[in-house]
Image: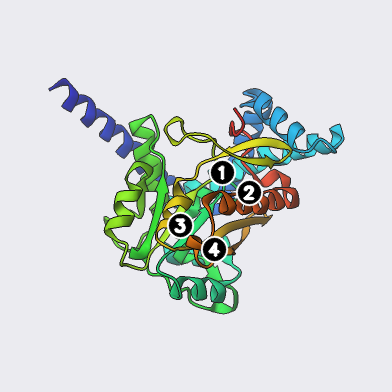
Amino acid sequence: MDGCILLSMKKLLANIIRGCIVIVGKLPLKFHYFMGDILSWIAEKLLRYRSDVVWINISRSFPEMKYKELKKVYKDFYRHLGEIVAEAIWFGASDYRRLHKQGLVEVMNPEEINDYFLSTPSMTVLSTHCGNWELMGGFLGYRTAGDVKVAIQEEQITVVYKKLSSEVSDDVFKRNRAAALEIVGTSCELESSNVLRFAMKHKDERRVYIYPTDQAPYKKAGKHPIGEFMHQETNAMLGSVGISCKFAHSVMYMKMKHVRRGKYEMTLVPICRDASQMTPEEIMRRYYDLLQEEINETPHNWLWTHKRWK
């Protein structure tokens, strides 16, 4: 009985938080950026949110940079962190039409995406914590270069995620990321522990599996060394690409370039057309090479508060 009451309380709290996001999210994106700037100042200057982690990460990742350059990456990162929160709240009250009208994200290579999607059994997309990963549920509402329609349907997309330890936070973030879905009551998200079973069940269907791939490996996933990444020895998780190899998926890297405030350019970069022809280690090595290129191009655009190297 007490467990049911606790569960109901958590659900009520999640509904209240989600309701507040929907109400506030209706305000213009410019308002949210203004509030995001205040939040980023508080996080950097007052709370010094994970300041030590950020400094250690960027200084080890860019040993060639001078202090002044590192300081700029540090400051630009916190400013961008405020933008991520602002965009996530605005997105939480948006649908595909609002997202498309705003033009927040543009898909740069829709023809190539269609080619890989339509010519292979299924597609694996390895995403990162570059750009704004909280906008993932709006993929089909992004603008596309040349107004070429992406051939993927909403019900064909599955975003794999790791459940948060807080049930309230997990509920709120999961629903917020799926806010733009056109099919009411549908969630495109799948908890990572269920993905193999799901992939086997749907192996004869053409689908897109999106995995956030740049985290430190979970304990149960084991450690798989893939060499240096950002000048540091790095372990990777191979579960996602192991499934890709098993079912001969095509594999693409999701690049989300931060062009300026309010503008991202997304490119799905091909890694392979048939993952069964590569090993999981080879695919992950290519993934981390592409991620390193992206970080070097826009250093502030990665989640430096994230404890990647433990």
Q: Is residue 146 left or right of residue 18?
A: right
Quarter holding the C terminus is top right
Quarter holding the N terminus is top left
Q: Residue at x 58, y 34 (%)?
A: 306
The answer to whether marks 3 and 4 mark residues whose Cβ atoms lie closer than 8 Å is no
Mark 2 sits on what residue? 288
Disc 1, SS: loop
Which amino acid, by three-letter code, is at mark 2? Tyr
The answer to whether residue 86 is seen in the rendering is yes
Q: CA distance from mark 3 to mark 4?
A: 37 Å
Q: Earlier in the sequence, mark 3 or mark 2?
A: 3
Q: CA distance from mark 3 to mark 1?
A: 19 Å
Viewer-nearest residue: 288 or 96:
288
- Classify residue 204 by image quadrant: bottom left
Q: Residue furthest left?
A: 1
- Classify residue 202 by image quadrant: bottom left
Q: CA distance from mark 2 to mark 4?
A: 31 Å
Which amino acid, by three-letter code, is at mark 1? Asp
* 3 or 4: mark nearer the eye: 3
* 4 or 1: mark nearer the eye: 1
The answer to whether marks 1 and 2 mark residues whose Cβ atoms lie closer than 8 Å is yes
Mark 1 sits on what residue? 214
Give residue 102's mark.
4
Residue 99, percent from left and from top: 49, 62
Residue 267, percent from left and from top: 60, 64
Disc 3, SS: helix
Q: Is residue 72 left or right of residue 54?
A: right
Viewer-nearest residue: 62 or 264:
62
